[in-house]
């Protein structure tokens, strides 16, 4: 082993020394204070788990990001790379109807085997929160507002961009529809709503006028009405924000940006089918922050 290699760390990981550790702990403490004040209780999750319980949830890309290994008992296990499914697996067996809705938060490291690029972290410290057992648009707005207020607490003006993934999921019934929505290539005989979504000209009225997507439009309108009463952030619906694979998300999907720098600092959404996969058919919505993405302003 050369002297240079001896003192290096693996790509994407590094120690935090005194000043950086103090900064992280200060940010973490402020988050915990805000979440506890909002009525959320903390849960602690394991950093490794068996792979098998999550196989049905994993996208191919997400699976590639997980560090996996065979332990000494011969079982395939993985290091934590995403909190949300682990929270569902932990809470589902213990959920009591009388305790719903649950408001919980979590914090800790996730480790991801990202494609190597300069400055990319593989080890990230995250804090997130969830509301479990409440399917209402009131809960959607509550979680989005809380995420925005967390950003505002660090001196930034939040920009929250949101959509409902069920719109695209409902319309992607053929390869042509999928191609049009994802590639933005519109054929002459394209479905009118798909054509508008792909071209970025669709409005909520267009989505509401189509029987296939009417319910999603109704929910988005209710969420927008609730958010309009807040001065904490700028909230914008982007109907053309369409993902090829929405993973476990089923409804509203949002991203939170620093409105000045346009840096993404948080993401979240509704996943009403996730807990059912672990035996508790309860709706849920939540968000996750990566602490190192938070820019503290004077």
Image (cartoon, grey):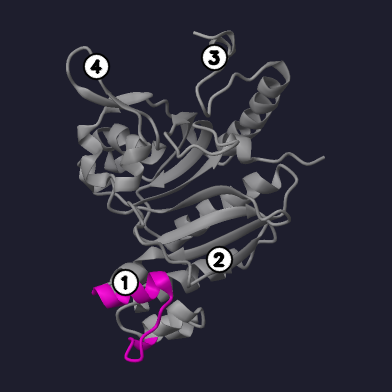
- What's the residue at 43%, 61% (across, down)? 252
| First in residue order: circle 1 vs circle 3 | 3
In the rendered image, which quarter contains the C terminus? Answer: top right
- What's the residue at 21%, 35% (across, down)? 53
Residue on which disc 4 sits:
71
Mark nearest the camera among 2 and 4 is 4
Q: Is residue 295 left or right of residue 79?
A: right
- The Cα atoms of the two marked residues, 1 and 2, are separated by 32 Å
- Residue 183: in magenta span: yes
- The Cα atoms of the two marked residues, 4 and 1, are separated by 40 Å
Mark nearest the camera among 1 and 2 is 1
| Image quadrant in which you'd find residue 114 | top left
| First in residue order: circle 3 vs circle 2 | 3
Residue on which disc 3 sits:
5
Mark nearest the camera among 3 and 4 is 3
Tag 4: Cα neighbours inside 10 Å, few (<14), some, or many (≥20)?
few
Residue on which disc 1 sits:
178
- Label pair 3/4, CB-CB below 8 angstroms: no
**In the rendered image, the vertical position of residue 97 relative to residue 178, given as above or below:** above
Tag 2: Cα neighbours inside 10 Å, few (<14), some, or many (≥20)?
some
Determine the secondary structure under disc 1: helix
The magenta stretch spans which residues? 173-192
**In the rendered image, the vertical position of residue 28 relative to residue 213, given as above or below:** above
Question: Mark number for residue 226?
Answer: 2
């Amino acid at each position: 082993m050369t002297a240079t290699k001896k003192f290096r760390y693996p790509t994407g990981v590094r120690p935090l020394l005194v000043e950086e550790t103090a900064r992280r702990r200060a940010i973490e403490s402020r988050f915990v204070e805000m979440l506890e004040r909002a009525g959320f209780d903390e849960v602690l999750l394991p950093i490794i788990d068996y792979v098998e319980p999550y196989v049905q949830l994993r996208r191919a890309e997400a699976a590639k990001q997980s560090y996996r290994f065979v332990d000494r008992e011969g079982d395939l296990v993985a290091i934590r790379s995403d909190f949300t499914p682990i929270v569902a697996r932990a809470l589902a067996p213990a959920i009591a109807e009388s305790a719903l809705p649950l408001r919980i938060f979590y914090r800790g490291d996730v480790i991801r085997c990202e494609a190597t690029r300069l400055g990319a972290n593989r080890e990230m410290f995250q804090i997130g929160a969830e509301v479990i057992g409440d399917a209402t648009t009131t809960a959607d707005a509550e979680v989005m507002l809380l995420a925005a207020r967390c950003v505002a607490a660090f001196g930034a003006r939040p920009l929250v961009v949101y959509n409902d993934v069920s719109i695209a999921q409902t319309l992607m019934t053929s390869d042509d529809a999928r191609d049009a929505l994802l590639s933005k290539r519109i054929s002459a005989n394209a479905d009118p709503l798909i054509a508008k979504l792909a071209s970025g000209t669709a409005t909520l009225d267009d989505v509401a006028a189509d029987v296939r997507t009417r319910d999603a439009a109704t929910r988005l309108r209710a969420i927008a009405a609730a958010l309009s009463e807040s001065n904490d952030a700028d909230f914008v619906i982007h109907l053309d924000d369409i993902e090829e694979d929405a993973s476990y998300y089923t409804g509203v999907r949002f991203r939170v940006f620093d409105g000045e720098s346009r840096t993404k600092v948080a993401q979240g959404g509704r996943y009403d089918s996730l807990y059912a996969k672990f035996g508790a058919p309860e709706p849920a919505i939540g968000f996750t922050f990566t602490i190192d993405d938070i820019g503290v302003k004077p």
